[in-house]
Amino acid sequence: MSDARCAALDHPLLDAAHILEDRDVRGIPEVPNRVALCKIHHSAYDASILGISPDLLVHVREAILEEHDGPMLQYGLQALQLERIQLPRIVALRPRRDYLEDRFARFLAA
Ligand SMILES: [Zn+2]
């Protein structure tokens, strides 16, 4: 179960976050369109507070980086800026790079 952790931080309580959203025709609930994130980081990803670049680095929305709202924000989100996400060791369980690319472009445009 060493792969059963949030891609953003080393903690459990996992969700399978969709990279391409349901409204995208490719946004199917299958492994290459999923990244394992905990509830908090899943919500942040869905809300484009947090993005994952195709080179697997976490990007936190600029306005959020400038906010001051205590340790949850500081350690739970801001500290992830430019951290590399952890991928499953099994290649078939990893997210597709082109999906990450598309979604990241939307994160940047949001
Ligand atoms: Zn997490």
Image (tube, rainbow, N blue to C red):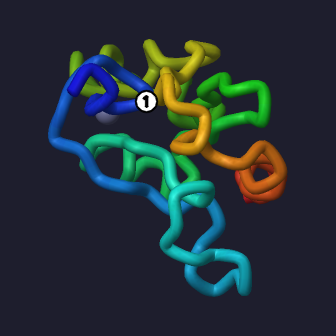
Image position, residue 29 (x, y; %): 49, 73
Q: Give residue 59's quadrant in the image.
A: top right
Which quarter shows the N terminus? top left
**Residue pictured at 59% horizontal, 16% vertical:** 84
Image position, residue 58 (x, y; %): 60, 27
Is residue 43 at least partly visible in the picture?
yes
For residue 45, side relative to residue 20 (left or right):
left
> Would you say the beta carbon of the disc 1 residue lies within 8 angstroms of ligand 1?
yes
Q: Give residue 4's quadrant in the image.
A: top left
Image position, residue 37 (x, y; %): 37, 42
The front one of 18 and 42 is 18
Compared with 59, 13 (above or below) is below
**Residue pictured at 83% horizontal, 51% vertical:** 98
Taking the view exactly as shown, the residue that stands out farthest to the left is: 13
Near mark 1 (Cα within 10 A), the count class, few <14, some 14-19 or many ≥20, is many
For residue 90, side relative to residue 27 (left or right):
left
- The residue where tag 1 is placed is 7
Is residue 47 at least partly visible in the picture?
no
For residue 51, side relative to residue 100 (left or right):
left
Which quarter shows the C terminus? bottom right
Q: Amino acid at mark 1?
A: Ala
Compared with 27, 96 (above or below) is above
Ligand 1 image-quadrant field: top left
Compared with 54, 82 (above or below) is above
For residue 92, side relative to residue 12 (left or right):
right
Image mark count: 1
Secondary structure type for disc 1: loop
The front one of 100 and 4 is 4
